[in-house]
Image (tube, rainbow, N blue to C red):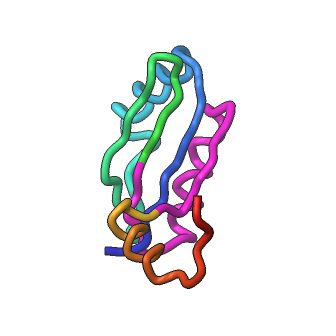
């Protein structure tokens, strides 16, 4: 497994419908080599989330770039699983107490 990235985006119903039609025609979409989607979700207000397993960060950014014309906002964050974070956190000396 590569590095995990979470994309969080915002769009509109009209733009989302346009994207779906373009994907059906094969005009946009498809994941480049080095980028694998682990799942994607959308909320009723058309905020979307997609989790990627990434071997090639440049390919991820090229993939994200193709969607920008339909997005009002797009953020991409490196993430860890909760289990990995807990393991990492346990190794940090002098962590602050709450």
- Quarter of the image with the N terminus is bottom left
Q: Is residue 72 visible?
A: yes
- Residue 36: percent from left, percent from top: 34, 60
Q: Residue at (37%, 64%) from the top-left corner? A: 53
Whether residue 58 is in magenta: the answer is: yes
Relative depth, front residue between 79 and 58: 79
Where 40 falls versus 59 (above or below)? above
- In the image, the segment drawn in magenta is 51-79
Relative depth, front residue between 94 and 78: 94
Where 34 falls versus 10 (above or below)? below
Relative depth, front residue between 46 and 15: 46
Where 24 falls versus 57 (above or below)? above
Q: Residue at (40%, 57%) from the top-left corner? A: 52
Q: Residue at (62%, 69%) from the top-left corner? A: 96
Q: Is residue 35 visible?
A: no
Q: Residue at (63%, 33%) from the top-left corner? A: 71
Q: Find residue 29 and report its image quarter.
A: top left
Q: How many marks?
A: 0
- Residue 26: percent from left, percent from top: 37, 40
Relative depth, front residue between 5 and 30: 5
Residue most extreme to the front: 97
- Residue 95: percent from left, percent from top: 58, 74
Q: Find residue 77 and report its image quarter.
A: bottom right
- Quarter of the image with the C terminus is bottom right
- Residue 12: percent from left, percent from top: 58, 19
Whether residue 74 is in magenta: the answer is: yes
């Amino acid at each position: 497994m590569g590095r995990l990235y979470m994309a969080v985006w915002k769009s509109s119903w009209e733009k989302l419908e346009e994207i779906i039609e373009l994907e059906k025609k094969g005009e946009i979409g498809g994941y480049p080599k080095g980028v694998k989607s682990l799942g994607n979700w959308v909320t009723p207000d058309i905020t979307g989330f997609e989790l990627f397993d990434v071997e090639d960060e440049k390919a991820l950014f090229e993939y994200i770039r193709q969607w920008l014309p339909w997005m009002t906002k797009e953020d991409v964050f490196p993430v860890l699983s909760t289990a990995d974070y807990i393991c990492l956190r346990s190794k940090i000396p002098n962590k602050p107490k709450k």
